[in-house]
Image (tube, rainbow, N blue to C red):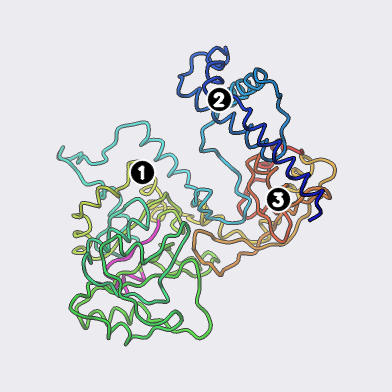
Amino acid sequence: MPKHSRKTRDVATDARAELIRALPPIDECLRAAESNAALAGLSRSYIKVIVQRAQADFRAAILAGRDTHPRDRDAMIDAVVRAAAHAVAADEPMLRPVVNATGVVLHTNLGRAILAESAIEAVAMAARSAVNLEYDLETGARGDRDSLIEDEICALAGAEAATVVNNNAAAVVLALNSLAEGREVIVSRGEMIEIGGSFRLPDVMAKSGAILCEVGTTNRTHPNDYADAIGPQTALLLKVHPSNYRVVGFTSEVTLEDLVEIGRARGIDVMEDLGAGALIDLTEYGIPHEPVVRDRIAAGAAIVTFSGDKLLGGPQAGVIVGRRAAIDRIKRNPLKRALRCDKLTLAALSATLRLYLRSGDLGDELPTLRILRRGVNEIGAIAPRAREIVAERLGLGYAVEIVDTTSQVGSGAMPVEELKSVALRVSHPEKSANAIAAMFRRARIIGRVTDDSFHLDLRTIEDPTVFAVKLETD
């Protein structure tokens, strides 16, 4: 690097450090803010929070080289207070609605499944009213919150009993702790999954108190691997659906049916973690096949766990279905209380399950299923209007093109399956794809950067007028 370039960079760095040191202390800004009329009536703790945020924004602007703030100390305090007052005027909850134009239908970071209208209504009802969460309306005695959803789950899964906790990771921990604490659980090395957030099966198993016994290899596991590993300390045979990856090529795995036969011969139950968990055959809706919970129970699994907010299309929950004796042991576990669902989750889940049982057109009423089954022609039909709206909002200099693309199911479901889709590719001769993405994020439209281009995938956009927002063009 040329010496003058290094010197210029060092001078700029020193200047930014000096500006940051010159920022007035929070206490001084807070005293000034408390006398500001726009902040009158607010609690001191809240004023402190927004002042801290305003100063953090100033600091970030300085570090990014975007500093346009006054150098005078009093003027800097005034600027922080004015920024805090502006934040109050535009105050919004931290959890905000966004437009998902990523093409990932079940986007974990964006909240996964969108609830059906009936589920939304059920949540609103439960939120504004007392409900019979654990109250038997016939006898007046204390009830069981699982009874609100157990019949529906069992009817759909073909299981003897069911219970629900707050997510599938909790379901796996609770089931293993209840059925195998201090004993061995045998699992194939090819199914030792890790999902988002560094959730690793070996770690989960260790926390459950079960002892991991790995068999086979990454790409090939045979029936004898399980049979030979069974011993006096074996409590369960565990099968894990590789929901966020696939092992291909020279591979071999033991089917659930074969695993059940091995277990029966030795008096050992089989548990399966399905992860995404489909309650119906998705191929009927033109969606790639995913194991159906009912089929896994029919194949002999004693316990099956799966998510409520993935392919099921409901709220975040972990569903555990299976034989009554095993479910009863799980329900008696003290951890069940720590992991149980609240009334809002149960209300949404119950309403979603009722759709499965009673809807005349589930593919239309359940948003997840409706979005997943959209064909490329249907998506392409809204593309011209979407392009027109976005191009008009962005103005001169931006190119907005309609392009073919592929979407993903998301949240670890169907990892190798791509869904044909249509997208808007947005470009500008003087702006990078990341800069355009940031501009859209400020408008709360979340797209994706692919091959150095910014895309708005229309699979997850059912009404193109959602783009009719004021986009910044800085």
Looking at the rendered structure, the kind of residue marked 1 is Ala
Looking at the image, which is closer to me, 246 or 407?
A: 246
Residue 13 included in the magenta stretch of the image: no
Residue 420 left/right relative to 277: right
Of labels 2 and 1, the one closer to you: 2
The reply to whether discs 2 and 1 touch (Cβ–Cβ < 8 Å) is no
Tell me the quarter of the image containing the C terminus.
top right
Instruction: Give SS at disc 3.
Output: helix
User: Mark 3 = which residue?
Assistant: 434
Q: Which of pointers 2 and 3 indicates the residue nearer the eye?
A: 2
Residue at image point 56% right, 40% down: 97
Residue 347: mark in rendering: 1
Q: Is residue 307 left or right of residue 100?
A: left
Mark 2 vs mark 3, CA separation in Å: 34 Å
Residue lying at 44% horizontally and 44% vertically, measured from the top left: 118
Q: Please state the horizontal and vertical placement of residue 392, each as a whole percent of the image.
A: 79, 41
Foreground: disc 3 or disc 1: 3
- Please tell me in which quadrant of the rendered image residue 276 appears: bottom left
Vertical comparison of 129 with 139: above or below:
above
Query: Disc 3 vs disc 1: Cβ atoms closer than 8 Å?
Result: no
Q: Earlier in the sequence, mark 2 or mark 1?
A: 2
Residue 435 in picture, x, y percent from top left = 72, 47
Going by the numbered disc 3, the residue's amino acid type is: Asn
Q: Quadrant of the N terminus?
A: bottom right
Residue at 52% across / 13% down in the picture? Answer: 40
What's the residue at 68%, 41% (across, down)?
A: 465
> Which label belongs to residue 98?
none
In this figure, which residue is indicated by the disc labeled 2? 25
Q: Which residues are magenta?
A: 295-307
Q: Position of residue 399 (x, y in %)?
A: 81, 50
Is residue 152 toward the left or the right of residue 20 in the image?
left
